[in-house]
Image (tube, rainbow, N blue to C red):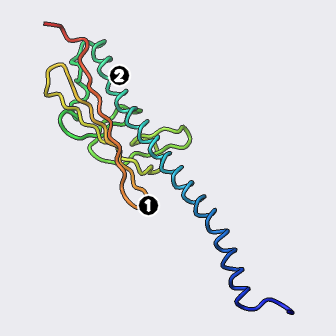
Amino acid sequence: MKGFTLIETLVAVAIMMLAVTGPLTIAHRGVQSALYAKDQVTAYYLAQDAVEYIRSVRDGNFLASKSWLEELDLCLNTDCMIDTIAGTKSNSGELLYNSSNGQYGYGNGGIKSGFTRTINIDDTVENNAMIEVKISWNTSLFTQTFTIQENMMDIFAPTP
């Protein structure tokens, strides 16, 4: 026997391809999972940021002797968007990411982040509000949505 036949060479190449393809597929799926997890964590923090902003406005209104949801009227029983850094409200827009300070907002001079945040404050029950924050973002295949809900009370309201 002087060398390998064509069949033996093709079989060897096929085995090498299988040996290389398996680990590469696993690595690719691991990277995709890590990116998806990163987006989920970012969505959670963006939602929690909005809830904390609303809580801050409520507490600030108490200190200023105002109605507890006074500065949030754009979000009462309808979807709105709030830039929690600038304190401005809007009805549309994608959050921008400013890489120099790591902040998300609507007018911070950053690049489009792919995340959209909508806030709805249902205040139909007296001295009580249901805060719903919905974060949406696009992946390569479809749109993801993360929703957080929190019940907030006017803790400074007079008791009957």
Q: Position of residue 125 (x, y in %)?
A: 14, 24
Q: Is residue 22 left or right of residue 148?
A: right
Task: Name the residue located 54 percent from the left edge and 44 percent from the top edge.
Answer: 99
- Seen in the picture, residue 107 relative to 57 is either above or below; the reply is below
- Seen in the picture, residue 42 relative to 126 is either above or below; the reply is below
- Characterize the local packing of mark 1: few (<14), some (14-19) or many (20 or more) Cα atoms within 10 angstroms: few
Residue placed furthest toward the front: 1
Looking at the rendered structure, the kind of residue marked 1 is: Ser
Which residue is more in the foreground, 139 or 87?
A: 139
* 2 or 1: tag closer to the N-terminus: 2
| Helix, strand or loop under label 2 | helix
Q: Which mark is residue 140?
A: 1
Which residue is more in the foreground, 110 or 13?
A: 13
Q: Which mark is residue 56?
A: 2
Q: Position of residue 90 (x, y in %)?
A: 29, 41
Task: Name the residue located 36 percent from the left edge and 33 percent from the top edge.
Answer: 50
**Residue 86 position by quadrant:** top left
Task: Name the residue located 17 percent from the left edge and 7 percent from the top edge.
Answer: 159
Which residue is more in the foreground, 140 or 108?
A: 140
Q: Is residue 134 left or right of residue 103?
A: left
Q: CA distance from mark 2 to mark 1?
A: 36 Å
Q: Nearer the viewer, mark 2 or mark 1?
A: 1
**Residue 47 position by quadrant:** top left
Residue placed furthest toward the right: 2
Q: Position of residue 142 (x, y in %)?
A: 37, 59
